[in-house]
Image: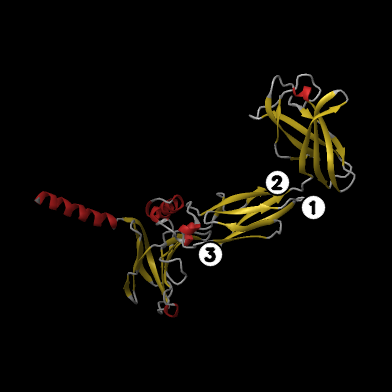
Amino acid sequence: MKRITVSILAMLVMAVVYSQSIAYTFYYDEVWIDGRGEPDGKPGVGKVVIYDNLDVVFEGRSTAFGNFKPSFKIQSASTSLDIFLTIKSSSDENCEQIILGSNGVMAIYSDKRNPNNEITYSLSSNDTERNSLTMESMMSAFKNRKGIFSTFRSEADLELPLKIEGYSSNYRVTSRAGGDEIAYSVRTKTGKMIDETAFEDFDVSSDAYWADVSFHTAAAFLLKTEPNTTGSTRTATITVTPHKSDIKTYMTVTQPSMVAKVNRVWVEHNKFKGLMKGMKIHVEFETFNVRGIQGNCNAYFSFSNGNKLLDYNGNYRAVDGQVCCPGYFTSGYDNTIYTDFELFMPYSELHISGSADCYFIVEVQVAGQSAASEKISFSFY
């Protein structure tokens, strides 16, 4: 029993010691204390010590005011182009924070909890290389979420900016000319959903009437685009803004103008064209801004399992060999509606022996674009 007690005590001591292990230390040899009458550049000594349990100690000694040793526990961190790292005790602006300079020689501690009596301690070093390796190591850990940063959760500065489909900026997507509905994921840098962070939720908006983003969850938003019949390509900007922050993430949506739309397809079976028995296919479709341009309205045939029906005599054949019933048109107006465009497909040209379940799809092709119908099923016997 005595051995067990000693072992447990030793383990507790080790745990306490480990919880206070130093992760990073930065040393300085000049001190300023703003707001206390300390002359700029007064000699002194100081250091910033960061522990692996997220404790931070900003320690120093000045000639006029003696020792100072403020400390707090890290809650968030961020970086920018001109600042190496900002470490905060809160995501609120009225908080304790330490700013480490990007040139490796400056550290600033500020207690903002009482705006009427803010105290700022500044440390600097004449040796520009003194802390550079430590800062590089710390930045690497921060970017890769290693060491002390691996335990961060829901801190505003660490999580921003939000990412759309993994991109924090310059994400571009193309919407179908005929419109579509697609969900796009929204996550933090570390992959958290927005409701796992201090921001709680986000707003998403569009600057275009045809791109609607009125619905979103904690992990995604739904983009609905209307058909583009304007005759030209158009763009929209989608903006994601987390609550409690003004840092925005943008997505650009490009949509080409549609040239055709298939509205309806219906079939009459066992019809004759001369001596050939087959199916009469009726198509209602529209074209947009392609006046005077020849197009195709074709029916492509497949078995119900998706395998293409293949042509063997070259009479009703697509380029890839699939059985195809072709039709041609030339739009006479900017916007043209074909209420009953007719195709005739002889049964003998399906090249089916026995019976089979099949389907066909109608495609309207014009000006390098196409619009397709739903599958139209039928049985051959």
Q: In terms of depth relative to the viewer, which is nearer, 153 or 358?
A: 358
- 171 relative to 29 in the view: left or right: right
Instruction: Give the residue type that dot 1 points to.
Output: Thr
Q: Residue at x 84, y 38 (%)?
A: 341
Tell me the tag on residue 243.
3
Residue 357 drawn at (x, y percent): 67, 28
Instruction: Give the residue type that dot 3 points to.
Output: His
Q: In terms of image quadrants, where is residue 347?
A: top right
Q: CA distance from mark 1 to mark 3?
A: 36 Å
Q: CA distance from mark 2 to mark 3?
A: 31 Å
- 130 relative to 17 in the view: left or right: right
Residue at which label 1 appears? 230
Category of crowding for the residue at label 1, using alpha-carbon neighbours closer than 10 angstroms: few (below 14), some (14–19), many (at least 20): few
Residue 119 drawn at (x, y percent): 41, 75
Tell me the tag on residue 176.
2
Whether residue 301 is situated above or below residue 121 in the rendered picture: above
Q: In terms of depth relative to the viewer, which is nearer, 341 or 292?
A: 341
Residue 288 appears in the figure: yes
Residue 78 appears in the figure: no
Q: Secondary structure at mark 3?
A: loop
Confirm or deny contact between disc 1 and disc 3 (CB under 8 A).
no
Tell me the tag on residue 68.
none
**Of the residues tagged 2 and 3, which is closer to the observer?**
2
Whether residue 98 is situated above or below residue 164 in the rendered picture: below
Q: Earlier in the sequence, mark 1 or mark 3?
A: 1
Location of the C terminus by quadrant is top right
Q: Secondary structure at mark 2?
A: loop
Instruction: Give the residue type that dot 2 points to.
Output: Arg
- 28 relative to 261 in the view: left or right: left
